[in-house]
Image: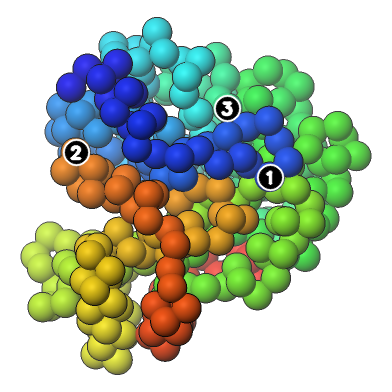
């Protein structure tokens, strides 16, 4: 499929939502390159998937940086003429290189990491540059000041944060506003099995006029049918990656099976319903998904068109949409 055909096909399918009180609109479903875009995945498969909104981080791979390198090659060879139609973001905050300047939220690390990301991708700027996690040992003024500098240098158009608590989000928005670089967007984890943002963060984002792009809406793959019959070989849980085997308790799987039944009654796959459920709240600008194939991407994109739930469906979902201990980013949002 050519880029033009994909663009027309997806534009007709995916609604766009305004990002807080900004001038930016994002597709209700965006593509993240956390998984499946490192050197272990065929470049041809990556090229077939990449189409609309791209979310990266400096250490996505494996190995670290390889997702940005691979994206940069596809950008150069396929997508360069369409740069102004794309929203491309990257993040810095987690470990990237050894030593005291290779992670967290110092000005030195964030700006050096952004420069490296731009070189890997062959870009002059990214649309959004995120602080990937809150750093309890660096003054927030320094971290937000680095984001402001990135925007003023023209290396990013907008500033974002990821996995910040409601309290720290208020502080970050205040600091950035005082610098003249408003906070555009927050990227928290959010799913039917990880509902922490309902405890105040969504209210803060609405009050501050900040957008929300929810990552891991499929709970690291748990909200699919993949694990209903056990742990498949080669799956994320089998490798004890971002989803570990000890998180797949029978109690949790019982909830997932019940949610799968609700999805079937709605005429959706479980993964589709999980994305639709995240998008049911108008304060969520976009759901950030991963994909290992074009078919999987197509299936998940369809969720954007079915975000209305009946009161009965919501009550049934609430009974099984319970915390499952899968928020591996909780330490950042507790600061």
Label annotation for residue 268? none
The residue tagged with tag 1: helix, strand or loop?
loop
The x, y position of residue 133, in whole percent, is: 60, 54
Relative placement, left or right, of 106 versus 327 is: right
Residue 322 seen by the camera:
no
Mark toward the start of the polypeptide (1 vs 2) = 1
Kindly identify the residue that appears in the image at 59 percent across and 51 percent down. 212
Q: Is residue 192 above or below residue 133?
A: below
Residue 167 % position (x, y): 77, 65
> Around disc 3, counting alpha carbons within 10 Å, would you say few (fewer than 14), some (14 to 19), or many (20 or more)?
some
Rendered view: 49 above or below 287: above
- Nearer to us in this view, 14 or 328: 14
Cα distance, mark 2 to mark 3? 25 Å
What is the quadrant of residue 81 in the picture? top left
275 left or right, relative to 181: left
**Distance from the alpha carbon under mark 1 to that under mark 2:** 30 Å
Count of picture labels: 3
Mark 2: give few (<14), some (14-19) or many (20+) Cα within 10 Å: some
Callout 1 crowding tier (Cα within 10 Å): few <14, some 14–19, many ≥20: many
Q: Which residue is mark 2?
A: 294
| Image quarter hosting the C terminus | bottom right
Residue under label 3, please give it: 127
Q: Nearer the viewer, mark 3 or mark 1?
A: 1
Looking at marks 3 and 1 on the same chain, the residue that comes earlier in the sequence is marked by: 1
Q: Tell me the element at label 3.
A: strand
Report the residue marked by disc 1: 20
Residue at position x 24%, y 63% from top? 268
Contact, CB < 8 Å: mark 2 with mark 3? no
Cα distance between the residues tagged 3 and 1: 16 Å
- The mark that comes first in sequence, 2 or 3, is 3
């Amino acid at each position: 499929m050519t880029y033009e055909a994909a663009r027309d096909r997806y534009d007709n399918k995916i609604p766009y939502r305004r990002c807080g009180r900004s001038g930016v609109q994002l597709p209700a479903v965006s593509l993240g390159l956390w998984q499946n875009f490192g050197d272990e995945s065929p470049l041809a498969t990556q090229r077939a998937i990449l189409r609309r909104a791209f979310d990266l981080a400096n250490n996505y791979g494996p190995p670290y940086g390889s997702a940005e390198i691979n994206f940069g090659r596809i950008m150069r060879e396929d997508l360069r003429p369409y740069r102004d139609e794309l929203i491309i973001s990257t993040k810095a905050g987690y470990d990237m290189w050894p030593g005291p300047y290779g992670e967290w939220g110092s000005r030195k690390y964030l700006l050096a990491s952004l420069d490296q990301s731009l070189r890997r991708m062959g870009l002059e700027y990214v649309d959004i540059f995120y602080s990937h996690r809150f750093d309890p040992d660096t003054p927030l003024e320094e971290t937000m000041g680095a984001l402001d500098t990135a925007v003023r240098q023209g290396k990013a158009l907008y500033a974002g944060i990821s996995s910040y608590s409601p309290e720290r989000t208020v502080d970050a928005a205040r600091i950035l506003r005082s610098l003249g670089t408003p906070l555009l967007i927050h990227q928290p984890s959010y799913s039917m099995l990880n509902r922490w943002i309902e405890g105040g963060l969504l209210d803060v984002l609405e009050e501050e006029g900040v957008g929300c792009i929810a990552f891991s809406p499929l709970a690291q793959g748990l909200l699919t049918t993949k694990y209903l019959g056990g742990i498949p070989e080669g799956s994320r849980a089998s490798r004890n990656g971002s989803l570990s085997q000890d998180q797949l308790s029978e109690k949790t799987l019982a909830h997932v099976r019940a949610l799968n039944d609700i999805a079937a009654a709605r005429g959706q796959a479980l993964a589709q319903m999980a994305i639709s459920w995240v998008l049911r709240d108008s304060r969520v600008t976009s759901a950030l998904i991963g994909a290992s194939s074009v078919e999987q991407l197509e299936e998940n994109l369809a969720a954007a068109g079915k975000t209305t739930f009946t009161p009965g469906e919501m009550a049934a979902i609430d009974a099984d949409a319970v915390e499952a201990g899968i928020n591996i980013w909780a330490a950042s949002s507790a600061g």
